[in-house]
Amino acid sequence: MDIDDILADIDGGSGGSLATEDLQALTRAWVNEKGSPEILTYPSELIERVMDRIRKQIETIEMQTGDMDPKMNFRLVILQTELERFKYLIRSFLRVRLAKIDKHALHILTNSEVKARLSASEIQYLTAHQALLHSHYRASFLAQFPPNLQRLDDTAGGISMVEHPDLDQVIFCRVLHDVADPITIEGTDTADVWLKRGDIFVVRWRHVADAVTKGEVELI
Amino acid sequence: MALPLPPGLTPPEVAFLCEMELVTVVPRQRLEGLELLGGTTPELRPPYRAVLPLWLALLLKRQRRANILPPPWLHPSSLDTILRLETEVHKETFSPPPLFPPSNNNLHETRSAPFLPSCTADAAADALPYHWLEVGEILLDAAPDDLVEPDTVRRLMRDLREVRMAKMRAGVAVLDGGAVVGLKGVGGMEVSEGRAFISGVIDNLRKIGASREQSRREREAEERENGYDDADEDEDMGL
């Protein structure tokens, strides 16, 4: 067996397994969510699989902690380091979603298409949190206002009180697959832009949102 | 608790992402394959090389259980070539990044940084990968004894960084509200540095020009409908 065989063997072993793919998918979901101005669809199956693995890994670590063998100890250090990295990834992902839910709460509540992107516990958080906030506002000052000024989603005067995500915000993205249709930004002098694999662009979110959902483009 | 951070990745988050890059190590101790959450690690048998994620390689390196084999582009002569590419051939743009692996048509399986083997011993020698700055700095910091002429590498990295920062700054002049800016070859840390400024400029210019853009869009739509009809432009609309 020469070195090439071993390398090929290693490549075959570490690539393509479901666990590795999930790590990649989770990382991509995290970066996408961090970059995009609006909330993206919750990858429930992916999170479930990863959480399941995390639970099993914690069990393994707990079972092996009693072992006093120094060699075993070092392996546990590696397992725990990786576990912490995964936990950080999940936490950061959920927290950036929570930040968006808080920011655009009324927008999400009134828009069923956006609301469908949330997980069950996120919806529960959103409704419970908004109910609390609303009753707090009402108790502390809203009740003393004239009735026509009490609404929190007023659109009088042409300005909506509901904060919507700015879909025209620019984002940084990498093209993973050639996109068939070019990007046209109407009303500006910008020429049509074709998204080719491997390119990196700074572009308005609105124009790549669909491609990101399809996986043709990822944010960076 | 929600995350009170600006959009995009902050420098520590970029470093975290970069630690998932794959590097080649030469183990000095045996270690059987471990069932990690992100897949099983290869068995380590000195003196055979193995490919590991950077965070694990650093852990092994710190305990002197392995040596890291630096990627070919982190060699003084390669960096020198790339620096020449940056200053003489591609004066306006970044030097071309390593080739993206061919597409396998499966939309959800395409790998990108940090999961491409762009920092292993088999990486291309003449192109800077996405996480070049972070990987370079981390290796200079944690494993200078594994690099060839670490001081020269450090100097060349600094030169490259300055040349590329100058390009990033020069690119600011062309920004406008409706622009689509191509940044092929840019690095992760460079995006993180430039993001707030670039997106701030583009977004604010867009907001300033929003009414003009809106009226022009309407006029163009109108023109498409009924031939060339010179409609009056209302500059103040929407303000």
Image (cartoon, coloured by chain):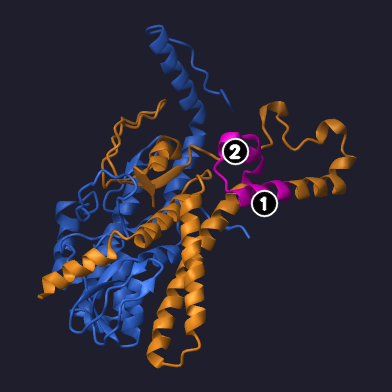
Image position, residue A203 (x, y; %)? 39, 40
Task: Determine whether the residue tagged by mark 1 lies in a helix, strand or loop.
Answer: helix
Q: Colour of chain B?
A: blue
Q: Colour of chain A?
A: orange
Viewer-closest of B48 and B3: B48
Q: Residue drawn at (25%, 80%), measured in percent from left and top?
A: B44
Q: Is residue B8 visible?
A: no
Mark 2 surroundings: few (<14), some (14-19) or many (≥20) residues within 10 A: some
Residue B190 vertical position relative to residue B145 in the rendered view, above or below: above
Q: Which residue is mark 2?
A: A164
Q: Nearer the viewer, mark 2 or mark 1?
A: 1
Q: Is residue A115 magenta?
A: yes
Give the mark, 2 or 1, whose residue is nearer the N terminus.
1
Image position, residue B181 (x, y; %)? 34, 42
- Chain containing mark 1: A
* Number of marks: 2
Report the magenta stretch's main SS.
Answer: helix
Residue that protrudes farthest toward the left in the picture: A2
Quarter of image, res B34:
bottom left
Q: Which residue is mark 1?
A: A125
Mark 1 surroundings: few (<14), some (14-19) or many (≥20) residues within 10 A: some
Kind of residue sitting beneath label 2 = His
Image position, residue A42 (x, y; %)? 51, 48
Where does the magenta region start and end?
Answer: A102-130
Q: Is residue B35 magenta?
A: no
Q: Which of the labelled discs sits on residue A155, or is there none?
A: none
Task: Determine whether the residue tagged by mark 2 lies in a helix, strand or loop.
Answer: loop
Kind of residue sitting beneath label 1 = Tyr
- Chain containing mark 2: A
